[in-house]
Amino acid sequence: MLTANRNQTSQADSATQQDDPGSSLEPADHSDAAGVSTPLHEARLAAITGALLASGARSVLDLGCGEGVLLARLAEQAQFSRIVGIDISVPAIHAAREVLRLDPFAPAGRIEVLQASFTDADPCLCGFDAAVMLETIEHVDPGRLSLVERAVFGCYRPRTVLITTPNQEYNVVHGMRPGAFRHPDHRFEWDRPKFRRWACGVAARHVYSVAFDDIGDCHPTRGASTQMASFTLDAGSKA
């Protein structure tokens, strides 16, 4: 469920994906032990897809696409004429291509899956209307987040950028012990104030505005399990 808790912060006012606590410590949280998609990840997919459709984007770049779950969802929408996913993991790339029935030797079509790192700015990935980082930034060492920022917001500069990440405040609601992470590969998990400070800083440095949403059931004081930042390139700025 995408809650109505949306706080708009303008740029001028501001200074491997999918991890579910319900299947904590599993390698991918988009499914439970039986391989069934979890309600929280379904809510994330719905929130991302809805935001992309509302943005008017026609081309989408999925940064850290994993096994192609979001790519498959986006492929169902005729609005998106170009969909590209990148991931550093060779097994994930193979799995995504299989899910999407892509022939790696065929000419590039509407959907592509490429091996690449989202910490490395690649000019070939410029020109997309929107970019998504679905439960991926928490897998990046904090010291390398500046590389992600430089690539996505400095080089690619899509009109829309959507980033989701776990809300550390909500972990206790899931019954997790203090200090525990939802996935063994997480390098950090941020509470809402820290995520918003980081996102507002990125927006200010690159002439974007940013708004925030809760995804999942909302606790009265701890927010929701997943938090999302929606960045929009300010009108008049060069994409």
Image (cartoon, rainbow, N blue to C red):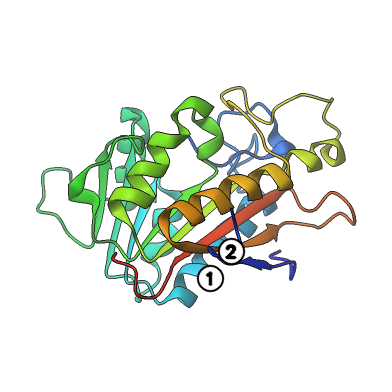
What residue would you read off at disc 2?
A: 47
Observer-nearest residue: 21 or 218?
218
- Residue 139 x/y as whole percent: 52, 31
> Dividing the picture into quarters, in which one does residue 88 lie?
top left
Q: Residue at x 52, y 69 (%)?
A: 51
Is residue 65 shown to the viewer in this render?
no
Q: Are discs 2 and 1 less than 8 Å apart at CB?
A: yes
What residue would you read off at disc 1?
A: 50
Instruction: In the rendered view, tell whether residue 71 sits above or below residue 119.
Output: below
Amino acid type for the residue under numbered disc 2: Ala
Label ID, residue 163: none
Quarter of the image where the N terminus is located: bottom right
23 on left or right of 49? right
**Cα separation between marks 2 and 1:** 5 Å
Quarter of the image where the C terminus is located: bottom left
Observer-nearest residue: 188 or 233?
233
Q: Secondary structure at mark 1?
A: helix
Q: Residue at x 33, y 66 (%)?
A: 129
180 on left or right of 52? right
Q: Residue at x 66, y 52 (%)?
A: 227
Q: Secondary structure at mark 2?
A: helix
- Residue 29 x/y as whole percent: 61, 39
Amino acid type for the residue under numbered disc 1: Gly
- Residue 48 x/y as whole percent: 53, 62
51 on left or right of 192? left
Instruction: In the rendered view, tell whether residue 128 sits above or below residue 124.
Output: below
Q: Residue at x 50, y 56 (%)?
A: 203
> Dividing the picture into quarters, in which one does residue 174 lie?
top right
Q: Residues within 10 Å of mark 1 (few under 14, many from 20)?
A: few
